[in-house]
Amino acid sequence: MALELRPNCECCDVDLAPDALAFICSFECTFCEACASAALNGTCPNCGGELVRRPVRPAEKLAANPPSRERTLKPNGCGRTAA
């Protein structure tokens, strides 16, 4: 089972290409570098877990394992919801 490689930051909705510097938690919540570091301090606002750098899928594997097209956006942006 491959990572979804979600196409956008859940906080600010910026597009995230498959090779973009992005951060995920263990549930694959996905955030851009700016939101992950500045707004979220490295903690997922959904589950409270650690945000780590999302791995980059090799270009030759993208055709058989394309990134997700489904966008996820938190209604309140980067407002924290997890304790």
Image (cartoon, rainbow, N blue to C red):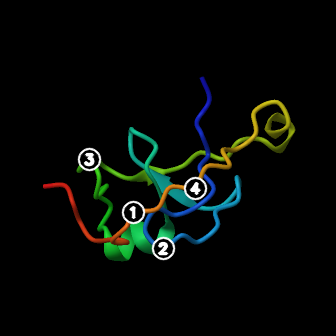
Residue 24 placed where, x, y %?
A: 45, 50
Q: On residue 47, which mark appears? A: 3
Q: How far is the residue under mark 1 from the one under mark 3?
A: 13 Å
Label 4: element kind:
loop
Dot 4 amino acid type: Arg
Name the residue carrying label 4. 71
* Residue 74 circle label: 1
Q: Earlier in the sequence, mark 2 or mark 4?
A: 2
Q: Is residue 38 above or below residue 58?
A: below
Label 2 crowding class (10 Å Cα cut-off): few <14, some 14-19, many 20+? some
For residue 82, side relative to residue 61 (left or right) = left
Sequence-first tag of 2 and 1: 2
Q: Disc 2 or 3, which lies upstream in sequence?
A: 2
For label 4, count other residues whose C-alpha is less than 10 Å away and answer few (under 14), some (14-19) or many (20+).
Answer: few
The structure residue drawn at horizontal position 43% and vertical position 50%, both measured from the top left corner, is 52
Q: Which residue corresponds to the image point at 29% horizontal and 52% vertical from the top-left?
A: 46
Alpha carbon distance from label 3 to label 4 = 18 Å
Q: CA distance from mark 1 to mark 4?
A: 10 Å
Tell me the crowding category of disc 3: few under 14, some 14 to 19, or many 20 or more residues within 10 angstroms, Cα based.
Answer: some
